Amino acid sequence: MAITPSAEPKTNHIGLSVLDYKGGKTTLCAGCGHNAISERIIEAMYEMGVKPERVAKLSGIGCSSKSPAYFMNRSHSFNSVHGRMPSVASGALLANRNLIALGVSGDGDTVSIGIGQFVHLMRRNLPLIYIIEDNGVYGLTKGQFSATADLGSKLKSGVINDLPPIDTCGLAIELGATFVARSFSGDKRQLSTMLKAAIAHHGTVMLDVVSPCVTFNDHEGSTKSYKYVKDHDEALQELSFVAHFEEIDVEYDPGTTANVTMHDGSSLRLRKLEEDYDPTNRIAAMTRLSEAHDKGEVLTGVFYVNTKAPSFLEMLNLVDEPLATLPESMTRPGREALEAAMEELR
Amino acid sequence: MIEYMKEYRIGPDGKATFAIVQAEDELAAIGMVIGAGWAGARSMTATAGPGISLMSEFAGLAYYAEIPGVIWDIQRVGPSTGLPTRTSQGDILATAFLSHGDTKHIMLIPSSVAECFNMASDAFNLAEQFQTLVFVMSDLDLGMNNWMSDPFEYPTTPIKRGKVLAKEELDKLGGFARYKDLDGDGVGYRTLPGTDHPAAAYFTRGSGHNDKSNYSERPDDYENNMERLNRKFETARSFVPRPEILKGANAKIGIIAYGTSHWGVIESRDQLRAEYAIETDYLRLRAYPFTREVHEFIEQHDRIYVVEQNRDAQMLSLLKLDLKPELITRLRSISHLDGLPLDARSVTDELSTMEGK
């Protein structure tokens, strides 16, 4: 019998195959938007050639926060407490600045119980990719509305939401996050591109991904259903990304396309679908988000990028090596230091 | 603190070998401590009773997921906002079991500024050795008033980082199970995020887990894990600071006190001897869980007066949980509750009255 030798597995520029980025089997519902996001994370990390051992996955509590178990098993992961992942992530990154930190949260975890820590995280510009898997409901506890549910959105039971939503993107821009974008779990290309740019960015990335809950919020009357989002999705730009290690550069027309050079030398290209939208203009970004609300659009795209602001690690003037593994010679001052301090107190 | 760090912890390249963050609240402060501890750095925060209350949930996470960190509690008078400018020892019981479920914590209890200095490094060593939070129970009198002190002695104990597997060890072992009790002391081996080995990663969680840190609701996994955590706490009993014991002449009466009560108690013992001819032995507790010496001291005396600065005899209650039933009746409480540092006279008066003098 003839044997067809299998082809060499495809590898990325650090020699790993996509299987090296896989996670455990998901326990989320079939069709859950979160599973698609996990797929995109695997894709982006693989394509960017990020070593899985350098990644730290951090999450709070909820369906979204379970998902780090379903991608990148070779990365350390910390499923912490409800709404407080930002502080845990902050501590971890200060301890080891070489980590590529990926925070996965949900709309309940971030916008209700976690709004306090979210707000302060955004102010610090810590180099962290913060993803909100946003479905507008609490999926683990029978689908109550969360604080990102739109006014007038309807639960399966017929209950109408009568409180205004909190726009995480508008909030993040106002507070100082330096890469703020919104995507849709069903938009493979846009989300993948954003994630790759997020990996290239050294500052706080706030990525709100509308991710429909097939069990509790995918029906007629919901504004976070697959159908509603597909019908109302307004993309600000068409995104493309050229990683720093890719040799072939594609020409672009500066008249129609904005080019953002990321910290690692990669390029994020934003082909304008709306005239004159400038993703480096904070105020314009907030105005455009407000307009989207009034028009009932699900506006997606990169709203704001700032590659100039110093990161929290730079503000703290940290040494290059991780604080976690500094040798004793650098962490315990000598006897003469204590004697001098004692002498001053006499 | 910041001034000392700037003076002594800037590397040759002018960069900081430390990070100090003003957190937005105590939840974030302990969250950062736990995040940093998980990633392998020594990390601490300081607070008072209301902050301890806020830290409760995270304290349970650190206990159950086994993450080192150091929390200082400068105890003041509760409940609630209480008397925020006054001193007490009112957080002992709440801190020993801080958080829901079966949770318990190591506490160190300094009585002088010099001891604060020593316990600051002891706390880090114990936290990393036992992969858990260590609470240092200071108080407002010690933390905010001026104290005389001899110059601090340069630490001679090495910095101990606990059971951490690096790449080289993983190369030899091939892999590891985060919560497996290989050494019988209840303490597993951990790896730090960023360790460059494909088998280094594990999934840290506050939910039920097995040896490998996989999610588990199996009754045997849960029970084994909780029993191991108990074994770890029992091991800690032999490693925490031992009590200081001062003997009288053939005393049948013992006094147990801790923290800043110490200074009033040593003066009171002189008063008791001089004024009432009452001889006492004295044990100053320096840590929880209680070491063997504490049990022996109680066995050696007919009556034990536990002197403390709270209403509910909190340390006495903790002792009761530890003691054989027949020893519990030996304990008597002398409680001091006015928010002022403990004075010798109030101890002398109460103890002599209870002794029928």
Image (cartoon, helix red, strand yellow):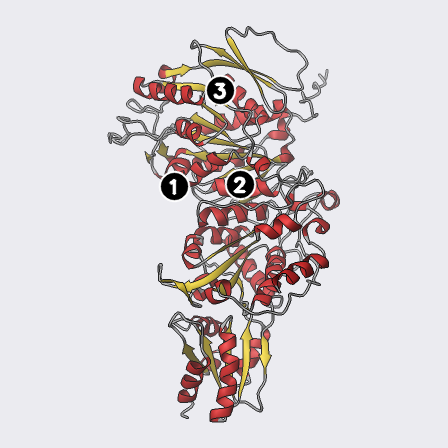
- Residue A113 shows which numbered tag? 1
- Give how far apart the Cα atoms at labels 3 and 1 are: 30 Å
Q: Tell me which residue sits at (26%, 26%) in the image.
A: A152
Of residues B23 and A297, the one nearer the viewer is B23
- Res B293 visible: yes
Q: Tell me which residue sits at (67%, 65%) in the image.
A: B153
Give x and y (percent) for residue B145.
Answer: 49, 65
Q: Nearer the viewer, mark 3 or mark 1?
A: 3
Three-letter residue code for mark 2: Ser
Of residues B307 and B201, the one nearer the viewer is B307
Of residues A247 and B345, the one nearer the viewer is B345
Three-letter residue code for mark 1: Ile
Three-letter residue code for mark 3: Thr
Give x and y (percent) for residue A314.
Answer: 59, 35
Q: Quadrant of the C terminus of chain B?
A: bottom left
Chain under label 3? A
Q: In the visual, does A51 lie left or right of A26? A: right
Chain under label 1? A
